[in-house]
Image (tube, helix red, strand yellow):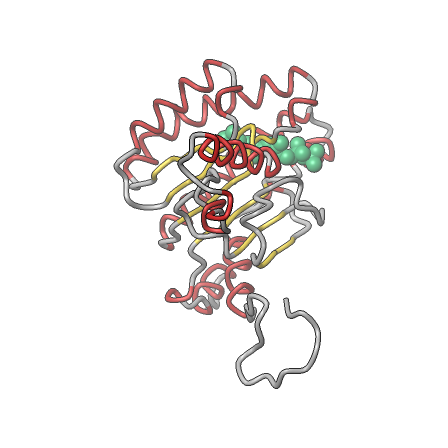
Amino acid sequence: MKGPGPEEALLAQLDRSRLPRHVAIIMDGNGRWAQMRGLPRTYGHRAGVESLREVVRACVELGIKYLTVYAFSTENWKRPREEVNELMDLLVEYLYKEIEELAANNVNLHPIGRLQDLPPHAREALEMAVSRTRHNTGLVLNLALNYGGRSELVDAVRALARLVKEGMLSPEEIDESTVAAHLYTAGQPDPDLLIRPSGDFRISNFLLWQLSYTEFWLTPVMWPDFRRVHLLQALVDFQRRERRFGGLSRGEVSCCGTGS
Ligand code: FPP
């Protein structure tokens, strides 16, 4: 008789009561995936949509509360115009194709980034998806679009400066919680787990504030090949980690260093 497959084995190891509340993913490696196959880069992005679909479904099934995916950065405008256009068209296609399933799965779509600078058809599709899923109470899907961690902080600083100028806030009142409350992710817990496929070891201007104590899980698998099984591997590995948030582990005798 055949034993359990890799997914079943991982599911058996997973403690459903200790899942991360918030998972963030840098969906990287689309271009290389395509180039390795002698295909134009845009084929990689198209294949990456299937990975996104599968990961969203898996997060819904598992009951993960927040998923943030990096779909387009503030730096991605530097790419050839055809690639940028294709990414915007893919976004629109994804939203119109997936909206019924997202809505039926109680997903709340929450785009983050400088959305005002996206092309009109992308903004229109996002408005449709946001209004269709506004009252949903399940997975919050943060779609990072024209997103940059630095520009998010600039936007927060500007908002706080305006409040100070209007006399609504004094500089002394500003603390970490005030800053967090002016980020695009206001009201959400910070990511517990960051997944970066494709073998690179960079943050790439993603969630610079929110990732302060996040556990990283890196894999050489390219995003278009990323499947449910890889998410389960990341989750099982996450549950083996000890998170100390700068303190000491339970029972550890104080010694030296700053903690991590
Ligand atoms: C990075 O790979 C990926 C992107 C810039 C786009 C990510 C988009 C998708 C996964 C498609 C789904 C998106 C939407 C909007 C629904 P890369 O092109 O930098 O890959 P490389 O590092 O191999 O060149």
**Residue 253 placed where, x, y %?**
61, 86
Is residue 129 in view?
Answer: yes
Ligand 1 is located in which of the four quadrants? top right
Looking at the rendering, in which quadrant would you find the C terminus? bottom right
Relative to 24, say whether 238 is above or below: below
Is residue 48 in view?
Answer: no
**Residue 130 placed where, x, y %?**
35, 29
**Residue plotted at (68% across, 32% down):** 31
Q: In this view, does 130 lie to the left or right of 216?
A: left
Relative to 57, say whether 192 is above or below: below
Relative to 254, say whether 191 is above or below: above
Viewer-proximal residue among 221 and 78: 78
Relative to 85, say whether 195 is above or below: below
**Residue 141 placed where, x, y %?**
42, 40
**Residue plotted at (28% across, 44% down):** 137
| Residue 234, quarter of picture | bottom right
Which residue appears farthest toward the left when viewing the image? 135
**Residue plotted at (30% across, 27% down):** 131
| Residue 26, quarter of picture | top right
**Residue 139 placed where, x, y %?**
36, 45
Q: Is residue 186 left or right of residue 128?
A: right
Viewer-proximal residue among 216 and 199: 216
**Residue plotted at (38% across, 30% down):** 98
The mark tally for this picture is 0
Viewer-proximal residue among 211 and 34: 211
